[in-house]
Amino acid sequence: TTATGGCDDAAGCDAEPDDVALLQKTFAVKTAQIGADGAAPTPTSTTPPPTGVGSNAHGDLEAFKSALMANTGACVFCVLLFSILRRCYPLMYSNNALKGKAPAIASETFLGWLPATWDAKLEGVIEHTGLDQAML
């Protein structure tokens, strides 16, 4: 073997220099994973390493509260937007109810669609809109 990592003709090496370097890197990685004393490292988490998820830590409650507030705000925004738009564009949001093809008619109040939605029975929805829409 030469000083640059290659083989000279007299030594009769069959391995290419890239193969030797790859083998050395693989050996170094395996040695680092096992440890110098030959013992496997003690796991610090029950989560598999590729996920990057760790155990609960300091500050997680604040992150949870922030996410809860943001998601609640997004849900309230969507309900309010729907309530406004259904009154501005009745043909778009209430066309089946206007034609009498809906299982229940929602009142014209701001949140009048909520009781009609809660009171809707599966059989009535299947009869008026079909099984696919009822399961959706």
Image (cartoon, rainbow, N blue to C red):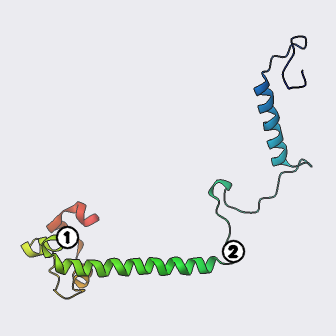
Looking at the picture, which amino acid does disc 1 mark? Val
Secondary structure, mark 2, is loop
Q: Residue furthest left?
A: 99
Count of marks, rendered view:
2
> What residue is at 79 percent from the left and 37 percent from the top?
25
> What residue is at 69 percent from the left and 74 percent from the top?
57
Locate residue 67, reporting x and y percent.
52, 76
Q: Residues within 10 Å of mark 1 (few under 14, many from 20)?
A: some
Q: Residue furthest right?
A: 37
Taking the image as drawn, is residue 119 in sight?
no
- Position of the N terminus, as image quadrant, is top right
Locate residue 4, reporting x and y percent.
86, 26
Q: Residues within 10 Å of mark 2 (few under 14, many from 20)?
A: few
Taking the image as drawn, is residue 115 in sight?
yes
- Quarter of the image for residue 103 reads bottom left
Q: Earlier in the sequence, mark 2 or mark 1?
A: 2
Left or right of residue 29: residue 85: left
Q: Kindly identify which residue carries mark 2.
A: 57
> What residue is at 43 percent from the left and 80 percent from the top?
72
> What residue is at 18 percent from the left and 62 percent from the top?
130
CA distance separating discs 2 and 1: 47 Å
Locate residue 79, reporting x and y percent.
31, 79
Looking at the picture, which amino acid does disc 2 mark? Ala
Q: Kindly identify which residue carries mark 1.
A: 125
Left or right of residue 47: residue 71: left
Looking at the image, is mark 2 or mark 1 nearer the viewer?
2
Relative vertical location of residue 96 with respect to residue 110 in this rendering, above or below: above
Left or right of residue 29: residue 103: left
